[in-house]
């Protein structure tokens, strides 16, 4: 298996019945995710993320192009045996308890475990739902439902995990647990494809990013390539006398006085000149850092400030 | 195992469905409401026993006819709702993300509905005997006729509803199945309804639509004396095979239509 997910020139058009109205949800979408990678799938609302995940899971059918998931066509039962899926706003049979829902999903996954009850108990403990075994899901909080959704996604020991907004509804501690879980899945060699609105989280855990807008992939690649240094540096000093301010401004530096020091941002070409000027003015240079774009900067630049 | 798990889950969901609970409440109300005329006829038995017996048997037959009709509505509605509710709530996404084939999902839903209808048929069977017992009568029949024929009939209604709901909204699916059921009974040779239709069209409808008359248990019961007619087993076999075949074809149509259906939260 060379790729875990492969989308080649996928197009999907929604057309209303008895109407000429056509909406192109995806146009020529092409990207790949290698086995063992954590891939973040980003885009503003209405960009086509849900449609892409729908095609990936075999819920929707592409009008043209070719998609492969774990070397099978999307929706193929052999591929689904190796996929764990957490839908956005995970929905469930509300009259069930957590263990009963997981028992149902264990049966549906076709996985045989020697001690199903013990296995489900351990899984519930892993997502911090131990102690709520007798509580009906209808009485669960939003965060508990999300944790249960994650547990059901993990139940079949999948090779590929597709998470649609995995941290939605979770508190900061819960979010951290999910990020730790994704890290541990990555260490186990699993492939994770996750869509999230929280770009700082994606930046922390993803190896690869695919950014989609209006049904088209506008950027995809490894995260370090996307966040490559932008050719600017940040010089942190302990103090900045008045005569140094004029010299720094002359070098084209932007000055930011914050509680943790004074930061001067300048093009890399003027770095040496600025530092020498500061030293000459008697300033103590504390740090010099290359300025990298954050994923949020890249995202906002690409989608023109749209809401992620 | 997967189909059994889906069927059991469908059955449990249906038992918690408010509309279906209402159905069962109406069932109980109809039965209780009919107690008054039943007891009145029973009190007449001292004066004119043969006339009272005839009236009692007719009343029981009429009540069972109504409950049988209710059963058809229940089968159609619960089958349509079993599929549509999963789409509406989005639970279908979590279920279909599992290695479950689409026809397995539909078959699980179908068997879940049949489990509900089994309970209903058992209730109907018990009720017919209880009513006869209250009226000091006895239904002399082989129980399987009263159990199997309604089940096959409801199996057809459920399969038709599942077939239609794969492409249409559940209310439309229910209405279409109801319409087809009524039309089927109106175009049967014994019916005088829709006389304005040309014969060729009536025959056409009769052969295309499910013949519920053929699958009526009263077809095999001499209702006046509530005893079993002497019917060769081949006749039972033909009637039941027809019903099961009709349900199977409807189900296969459903599986075919559902094969390419987009699964989204509606």
Image: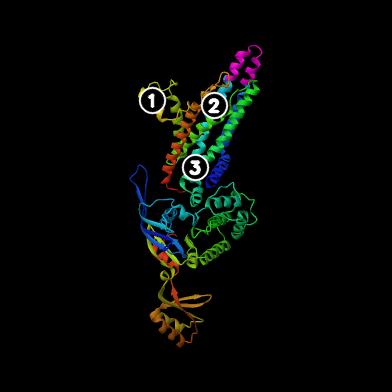
Q: Is residue A55 left or right of residue A137?
A: left
Front residue of B214/B9: it is B214
Front one among A143 and B85: B85
Horizontal and vertical percent position of residue A222: 42, 68
Asked if residue B122 can be seen in this view, the reply is yes
Residue A98 against residue B243 in the figure, above or below: below
- Taking the magenta stretch, the answer to whether it contains residue B47 is yes
Q: Which residue is mark 2?
A: B66
**Magenta stretch: dominant SS?**
helix
Real-space Cα separation, disc 1 to disc 2, in angstroms:
27 Å
Q: CA distance from mark 1 to mark 3?
A: 32 Å
Query: Is residue A270 left or right of B96 when viewed as pictured?
Result: left
Q: Callout 1: residue from which chain? A: B
Magenta highlight range: B37-57
* Left or right of B71, for residue A299: left
Task: Answer above or below: position of A160 versus A267.
Answer: above
């Amino acid at each position: 298996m060379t790729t875990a997910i492969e989308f080649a020139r996928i197009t999907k058009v929604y057309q209303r019945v008895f109407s000429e109205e056509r909406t192109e949800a995806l146009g020529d979408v092409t990207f790949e995710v290698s086995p063992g990678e954590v891939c973040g799938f980003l885009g503003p609302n209405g960009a086509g993320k849900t449609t892409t995940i729908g095609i990936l899971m075999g819920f929707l059918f592409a009008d043209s192009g070719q998609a492969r998931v774990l070397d099978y066509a999307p929706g193929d039962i052999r591929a689904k045996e190796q996929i764990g899926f957490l839908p956005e706003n995970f929905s469930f049979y509300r009259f069930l308890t957590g263990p009963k829902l997981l028992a149902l999903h264990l049966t549906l996954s076709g996985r045989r475990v020697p001690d199903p009850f013990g296995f489900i108990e351990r899984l519930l403990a892993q997502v911090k739902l131990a102690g709520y075994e007798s509580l009906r899901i209808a009485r669960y909080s939003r965060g508990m439902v999300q944790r249960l959704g994650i547990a059901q996604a993990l139940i079949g020991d999948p090779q590929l995990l597709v998470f649609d907004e995995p941290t939605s509804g979770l508190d900061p501690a819960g979010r951290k647990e999910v990020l730790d879980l994704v890290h541990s899945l990555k260490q186990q060699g699993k492939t994770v494809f996750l869509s999230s609105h929280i770009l700082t989280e994606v930046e922390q855990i993803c190896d690869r990013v695919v950014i989609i807008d209006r049904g088209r992939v506008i950027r995809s690649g490894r995260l370090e390539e996307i966040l490559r240094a932008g050719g600017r540096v940040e010089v942190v000093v302990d103090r900045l006398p008045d005569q140094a301010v004029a010299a720094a401004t002359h070098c084209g530096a932007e000055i930011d006085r914050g509680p943790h020091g004074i930061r001067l941002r300048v093009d890399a070409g003027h770095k040496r000149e600025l530092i020498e000027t500061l030293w000459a003015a008697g300033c103590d240079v504390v740090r010099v850092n290359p300025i990298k774009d954050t994923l949020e900067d890249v995202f906002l630049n690409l989608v023109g400030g749209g809401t992620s | 195992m997967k189909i059994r798990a889906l069927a059991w889950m469908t059955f449990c969901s249906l038992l918690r469905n408010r509309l279906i609970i209402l159905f069962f409440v109406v069932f109980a109300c109809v039965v209780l409401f009919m107690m008054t005329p039943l007891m009145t006829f029973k009190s007449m038995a001292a004066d004119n026993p043969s006339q009272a017996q005839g009236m009692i048997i007719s009343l029981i037959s009429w009540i069972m006819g109504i409950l049988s009709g209710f059963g058809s509505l229940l089968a159609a509605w619960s089958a349509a709702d079993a599929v549509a509710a999963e789409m509406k709530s989005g639970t279908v996404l979590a279920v279909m993300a599992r290695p479950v084939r689409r026809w397995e999902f539909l078959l699980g839903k179908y068997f879940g509905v049949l489990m509900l209808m089994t309970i209903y048929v058992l209730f109907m069977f018990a009720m017919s005997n209880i009513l006869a017992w209250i009226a000091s009568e006895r239904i002399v029949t082989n129980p399987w006729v009263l159990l199997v024929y309604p089940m096959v009939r409801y199996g057809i209604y459920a399969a038709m509803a599942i077939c239609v709901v794969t492409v249409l909204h559940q209310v439309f699916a229910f209405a279409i199945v109801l319409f087809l059921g009524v039309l089927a009974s109106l175009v049967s040779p014994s019916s005088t309804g829709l006389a304005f239709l040309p014969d060729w069209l009536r025959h056409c409808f009769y052969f295309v639509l499910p013949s519920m008359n053929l699958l009526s248990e009263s077809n095999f019961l001499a209702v006046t004396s509530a005893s079993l007619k002497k019917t060769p087993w081949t006749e039972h076999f033909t009637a039941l095979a027809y019903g099961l075949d009709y349900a199977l074809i409807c189900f296969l149509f459903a599986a075919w239509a559902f094969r390419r259906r987009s699964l989204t939260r509606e």
